[in-house]
Amino acid sequence: MTDLTRHTAAELAAQLADGTTTSVAVTQAHLDRIAAVDGTIHAFLHVNPELSLAAAAASDARRASGKPLSDLDGVPLAIKDVLVTTDMPSTSGSKILEGWMSPYDATVVTRAREAGLVPLGKTNMDEFAMGSSTEHSAYGPTRNPWDTDRIPGGSGGGSAAAVAAFEAPFALGSDTGGSIRQPAHITGTVGMKPTYGSVSRYGAIALASSLDQVGPCSRTVLDAALLHDVIGGYDRHDSTSLKDAWPSFAEAARSGAQPGSLKGLKVGVVSQYAGEAFQTGVMTRFRESLEMLAAAGAEIVDVSLPSVEHAVAAYYLILPAEASSNLAKFDSVRFGMRATIAGGGTVEQVMSATREAGFGPEVKRRIILGTYALSAGYYDAYYGSAQKVRTLIQRDFDQAFASVDVLATPTAPTTAWKLGEKLDDPLAMYAQDIATIPANLAGIPGISIPSGIAPEDGLPVGIQFLAPARHDAKLYSVAAGLEALLHAQWGGPLTSQAPDFDTAVPTQSARSVSPTQSTRGGA
Amino acid sequence: MAKAKLMDFDKALELFEPVLGFEVHVELNTTTKMFSSAPNEFGGEPNSNVTPVCLGLPGSLPVVNEQAVRYSISLGLALGCSIAPSSRFARKNYFYPDLAKNYQISQFDEPIAFEGKVDVELSDGRIVSVDIERAHMEEDAGKLTHVGGATGRIQGAEYSLVDYNRAGVPLVEIVTKVIYGAEADAPELAKAYVATIRDIVVALGISDARMERGNLRCDANVSLRPRGQEKLGTRTETKNVNSLRSVERAVRYEIQRQAQILSEGGTIVQETRHWHEDTGATSAGRPKSDADDYRYFPEPDLLPVEPSVELIEELRAALPEQPAERKRRLKAEWGFSDLEFQDVVNSGLLSELVATVSAGASPQAARKWWTGEIARIANAADREPTELITGAQVAEVQLLVDEGVLNDRMARQVLEAVIAGEGSAREIVDAKGLAVVSDDGALIAAIDTALAAQPDVLEKIREGKVQAAGAVIGAVMQAMQGKADAARVRELVLERAQA
Amino acid sequence: MSDISEDRVRHLAGLARIDLTNDEVTHLTAELSKIVDVVATVSAAATDDIPATSHPIPLTNVYRDDVVTDDVLTTEQALSGAPEHDGSRFKVSAILGEEQ
């Protein structure tokens, strides 16, 4: 292991700028780290050292000629496999897309490349981002660096674990109901879901179009903001893309970290997110963070969002409905897997056999549920009602934000659970998203940052902040303010406290799949 | 395919009232597709005019073509429709290999245009008003080619090939309300309605409107109800009707077929039927069933279309004249007799004449070509005149006549060559050396030779039997292999007689 | 209570073109019954006077100019991921149903 992997993206950028290090050295250090630990963690589905090192060398050449593409030129980046890339396979964690090479790059990937970021590889995820544990990946689960018998959260468990295990300084994720924020909470990292429409969805393999949003994963708030600055902004390829002129999020994070920035901030604590469902240690750390904010001059008030009671139900109608349609394109005609049938079969039979063989159980469950919710005679009661609940939740948020600047909640009810523990109980798994889902339904931004370690199990816990739509900068500022106080207490990012697992032998859980099934190593 | 037993048409009308409805799909001639920036062209190299959106590649997203929206509003206004202050796209979900995403982006309960009315003129000049229920925007599907099996049809094929060049081409679907009272005019009304829609979109300049190329497609709904009964009968929906003539024939056929079945105590199956131009019959397709659960829902990747009042009024002000008004104007401009004009209208050739005249031909010459030679060739080939040649091509032939390069006979020859695809009229004239001999010297020499063989001709002319010149003209034309201007030869012969 | 039966699950799987095994049908029927009971509670919360929200951030009239862009793929790129093609078109086995 080299020290370079312990640095934040901001620190690496500074070292690249002053010539202390090179992109090749930084990239090689992360590739070495991946080689050392990813057999255990399985955060990556695909890495291609040659490709990464070539991109790193090109970056060094630009730096040498005094023409870096951006401040971050040469910093390595992990990319969630939901984002399509022309030089690495894009599978969205599904067997149905095994080995598929996209002829185009996702807009966020294009922007990362244009900023000189060095792609390290594609990270593991629940199949088509359906899940909260990354156990629904067709290529085997990712393990939590804090305890490799436990899940890393989901669907973006790969990106979160890669960052937590120092395999990458930051990563791209996607968040439909918490897939960036919940893994951040579970792995002691930072995850931001931007305002709907502020980051392009073009090239993000769609789960639920009206909920999906791409965002950054990192170990610090500033790194998330730096990455957000690279990927955000209007894209003509995405009709839902906002044309707003966004402020610098990195600037917001830097100024938020200054002493005194939290003075006068009004923080609303959502009363609905407490009680039995929430683990003791989660609530302990949450309250401590609130006390810290108050001590720094923030005003803490109680806020009620009565309609979030229906959020999970509405979400599990809207998401399956949209997903059932979005996933119809996986039919064995233009791309992806095709099942063979004895005697050839009709195209209808081939499609049905392909989708039977290519989709995992959670994907089938949600497609059937979504098909049901949209069926003739059920639309009004299910999909139509769910869209109305969305209106109610938006109204709740509007009312709350009329009196507070941001809302605070525990990011998720519990710390990381054991692999396999909730696999046979979909409803228990769905309940994990209770605090993250409302932001997707309302389109507002949300960020999760580490708030400490639960005393009872030694696992990380996160706090979530929510802001009104388009106020993403406010979140970076507030999160950076609290983070600065916490880092002062901890002596650095929470991830520094993670136990070393390098020599740990993975315990084979019932569902684990050998990492040799992955496409690691490239073509 | 065996023709079903058909009842005599007049008998069918005695027993039943035909009830009609039409769904016409118009392909818009925008530069790019409805939701992708791929060229709106097909017929070239398969799968060459596609973006990730047309192929429904993972991660791809649709973005609406503004021009297609403007065209759709213009069409809605021309159909006398109200334009919705807010309309939305919806997904129509069904699996089919030509549908890249396995859903079609269409409009469902919030179409862009609704509640209109179109006046349709029948061949005897009567006007029938057809109520329009809605016009909505949607995207076309790709093109399937069925390989193997005897007919190239879907049945019996071994495999199919898919070209997505057409996938995503902008369509407007125009849906009529139920049409009652057409009676014996039903087949003609069907044809006249589609011709009117065609004239409207051509006048708007928003579609190439070539039925044989699928730019304009008609699904005809036909049902019968026994005289004196109030309840509507079961309807069939006939697809694949690719010419004005077949619209008329298909409706007539369905009336006769259904009447026969009903009169025998049978029942009509609610189904899609396919029209076969070759056999002049329809065949049963897919029965409508509750399996057609399209699970429509608002397209989450697209936003509502909310045209401003200013935009609607701007487009309304730019509308071309109504078809009936246009006809009155053209008839006056061209100076046609009632009979001449009606002949053109009934042949569905009005737009072709406009194109021919605007390319430089005189109205009478344009009329003669289209209702004469071209109609004859089309009839012999069992095709539509419009499929054979364009107005500009016809005008080019006529201009060569006007310039004296071609005589009538040669012009017909050139026209046939143009239709056969041998090139432009001028290219053909050059290639075949087809120009009238205008050198009087050569003509006089040929006349001398002919007069030597028929010495009594000049005498007959001088006696007043001018028609005797015909024998000499014929001989000269033969000698010149047809490349002489017959009128000039005649002049020269008459001059000689008076000398 | 939900009306999820094995027959309905089979019908839905047909619409969704997934050739479920009998075991999967049995399993899914039980699971979906429970899930539907939970999600169906939304209809109680949604009264007639509440408008539906289909887009979290409301926008209207989002259009593209009618201009060809560099997003157009070559035929080779278009076919690059195809399970089967003939050099210019995607190849599929015989089609049972009718054209739509």
Image (cartoon, coloured by chain):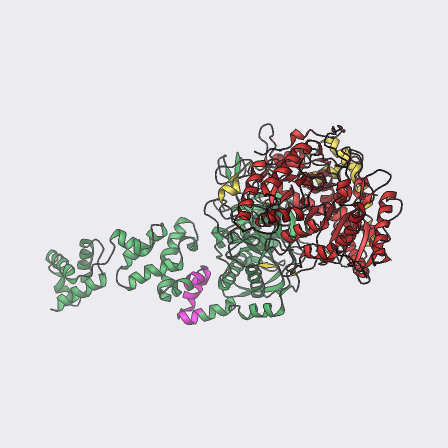
Chain colours: A red, B green, C yellow
Vertical comparison of B449 with B156: above or below: below
Closest to the observer: A94 or C6?
A94
Which residue corresponds to the image point at 79% horizontal and 51% vertical from the top-left? Answer: A485
Mostly what secondary structure, the magenta segment? helix
Residue C56 seen in render: no
In which quadrant is the N terminus of chain A drawn? top right
Task: Reply yes or no: does residue B350 show up in magenta.
Answer: yes
Q: Residue furthest right?
A: A276
Q: Position of residue B478 (x, y in %)?
A: 20, 54
Vertical comparison of A174 with A362: above or below: below
Q: Position of residue A432 (x, y in %)?
A: 80, 43
Residue C68 seen in render: yes
Closest to the observer: A442 or A346?
A442
Going by the image, does C90 lie left or right of B291?
Answer: left
Closest to the observer: B226 or A208?
A208
Going by the image, does A102 lie left or right of A291?
Answer: left
Quadrant for residue C64, please give it.
bottom right
Going by the image, does B302 lie left or right of A104?
Answer: right
Q: Position of residue A478 (x, y in %)?
A: 77, 55
Task: Reply yes or no: does residue B199 show up in magenta.
Answer: no
In which quadrant is the C terminus of chain A drawn? top right
Q: Position of residue B229 (x, y in %)?
A: 68, 55
Quadrant for residue B89, please give it.
bottom right
Closest to the observer: A334 or A19?
A19
Count all numbered tags in the image, as a single digit. Answer: 0
For the record, the magenta segment spans B330-353
